[in-house]
Amino acid sequence: IIRILTVISVLATIAILLNLFKIQVNDSETYVLAGANQQFIMQESPSKRGNIYDSNGVLLASSAIKYTIGVTPKDVRSLSRKVSEEEIAAYAANALSLPLSEVTAALEQKGKSYIQLVKAAPEESAEGLRSWLSENRVGGFAFDLETERLYTNGDLAGQLIGFTRFEDNKLSGVLGLEAYYNSKLNGEPGYSYARRDNYSNHGTVPFSIPTDQKAVDGSDMHLFLNIEMQEALQQELEQIAGVAGLSSGVCGLVMDVNTGGILAMGQIPTMKSQNPFAMPGGIDPQYWNHDLDEITDQLSLQVWRNANISNLFEPGSTMKAITTAIAFEEGVASEHTQFSDDPIEVMTHEISCVYKPGHGVETVEEALINSCNPVFVQIGQLIDMDLFYDYISTFGFRDKTGIDLPAEGNTIFHKQPSILDYANLTFGESLAVTPLHMARAYAALVNGGYLVTPAVVKEFVNSDGTIEPLISEEPVQVISQQTSERMKQLLRGAANEGHSWDFACEGFSIVGKTSTSTDETDGQSTYSFIAVGPEEISDVLCMIVVEKPITKFSGSAIVANHTKRLLGKVMDIRGYKRSYDEDSAVRLGENITLPSITGLTFSEAAYALSEMNIFARRANPEMHYDEPVSYLKLSANDEVAVGSTVWLTNQPEQEMVHVPDFSGLEYHNCIWLAEESGIVIRVNGTPSPSGVLAQDPLPTISEISSEEYDEVGAPGVTDGGENSKAKVARGSIIDIWFEDADPEE
């Protein structure tokens, strides 16, 4: 028996020793880590997400830290016995701006495991309370951090900027720039490792030395985007959407043709970065899915998707300029080479000019202005098909543009094109590209021949103050400088010939091209216009695309008018000087008599006015385009300045707006200021470089000094305090006087 017990003891000892060896040697790292996890606490300190600024330093997005603070009542006490429970309650109530009775009542509920004191305490208040609790060794308080993203852009450039959500104790970008540059904006969180005590508040052991790794705040992002140009773009998109009766399918952009910098990018419907799940304005609620579980799919397809970089369309006639440039490069045709625009048959398919009587024999220059398809098919026949497709690749149509935004779309071409596919390609069919692809190619046509990489972000400013410019790919020359100059001359004619006079770019020389493409499946058309100005330096490009209008629509001419209007605003924002000749000044000085539009729907009224170089906006954004106009501030036969924006509504109550000061402003700046202010102007006299001399009513910030009238027949003006009587209903007419106005009038 003794031997058996001895053997058992020896075996047990060996087993114990082997197990100890396994624990202390083989599995030592596992148990050291487990012990460290019990003895040490790791606290994460969040990094601050970087701000987003426009090109002029206007803040578009920032972050604010908020805390949810609660208590476990039974654990609220001072471990060092420095302060009483009453003192704890008093300090917490004062720090969080809460009634003392509320905090005291919460601390008395010892049986509850958790009671929330405040939902969104400011960082300063929360950190002050936390510091005081730490100094006095008070436990039982819980601080749950949440970072909130704050946007100031409203619904401007929402799809471009994007939005964030709070997850895993930090903000994460979901869309647009916020998603594309998420890690750069977020920075790196900090950590603190320290030995902890055995109390439920997980405090640190006195005199223990923590190991800290400081947080690295995210970088601030500075954009090429100009928020003033963005607002101008959005105004034009909203107006043309009204004419077209569309709540979606309208998009546009503004780009610097030399750098590729995106100065503005927008679409209809808009999206608010601060509230991306909200129903966009202008959409009829009956067509909107309000089921929260399904709304994300609808938003992703209809609202969040960036149409300028993700949606594809057949470019149509704008491609004819690309065909012309290729012909110039290969020397197969010149501006004066003549072709017949008679219908041409390709693989039993007849291709004819949209103008059915035809234009007969015409030069390449005339064909570009008249947009004759047969001529460009013939030009294509002079160029080897494979060579032509190589040029298409060189112009960037087969690859993504490389813009710094997520979800850029791929273009579509025939993999093995037939002769008919090639013929259609020469005038812009049998392919599908994004609006940005087309804008990028046009920039190369006019900037000396260089294909640039579009970019939204100009530079980052890191948390240490260093500036980190974003370096784009080197521009690639795709056509010669000489061809680029020749194309500018041709596109100047294409931008101005064949369209009714429009006021927007009067005083500037611009280049551009209209386009129409038709969907053979439903017969509906998509219209676009690309404009670049000023012609002398070819600095900035504007593009608007309108997909399948549902109202009476006079085609690309309306899109051209709005795109030129946008370009005119952008060039004025950039400070380029207009040069009015005598004829221009006379035309601008002739007011337009308004027609009767009462009872028409918004779209019908907007269309009728657009034909007269008058533009319409909704006074109340909730108004739908198919609702009738009523409660007009203006009446039939009222006279307003050419290019004015009038405000249409179906509501009886009109918002009261301030009257701006027009003194010294030239004609177009008066038009833009009136639109921005919500009023309409009427011109007295011929516009001149000296600008407006007087107005009636007076500016809100001015007051009438006397009953006398000045030399141009308008009330005198002196500086003074705010004149509340000068506030007028939105859409009211303000008279302005130029130097040759007749005082008797």
Image (tube, grey):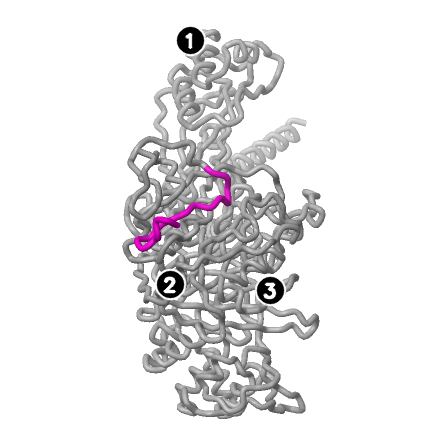
Q: In the picture provided, is 36 more to the left or to the right than 305?
A: left
Compared with 208, 360 (above or below) is below
Query: Is the Cβ of the residue at disc 2 closer than 8 Å to that at disc 3?
Result: no
Q: Helix, strand or loop at disc 2?
A: helix
Give the quadrant of residue 564. Answer: bottom left
Find residue 370 and report its horizontal and vertical position in percent: 51, 80
* Image quadrant in which the N terminus is located: top right
Q: Helix, strand or loop at disc 3?
A: strand
Membership of 733 in magenta stretch? yes
Magenta stretch in the rendered image: 728-745
Q: Earlier in the sequence, mark 3 or mark 1?
A: 1
Badge 2 is on which residue?
Answer: 586
Q: Amino acid at mark 2?
A: Val
Q: CA distance from mark 3 to mark 1?
A: 70 Å
For residue 476, the mark is none
Q: CA distance from mark 2 to mark 3?
A: 36 Å
Question: Is 164 or 600 nearer to us in this picture?
Answer: 600
Question: Is 596 or 460 nearer to us in this picture?
Answer: 596
- The residue located at (40%, 91%) in the rendering is 331
Question: Is 714 or 245 nearer to us in this picture?
Answer: 714
Quick check: can you spot residue 533?
yes
Badge 3 is on which residue?
Answer: 547
Compared with 174, 331 (above or below) is below
Query: Is the Cβ of the residue at disc 1 closer than 8 Å to that at disc 2?
Result: no
Find residue 122 and report its horizontal and vertical position in percent: 44, 27
Find residue 62 and report its horizontal and vertical position in percent: 42, 40
Q: In the picture provided, is 187 more to the left or to the right than 284?
A: left
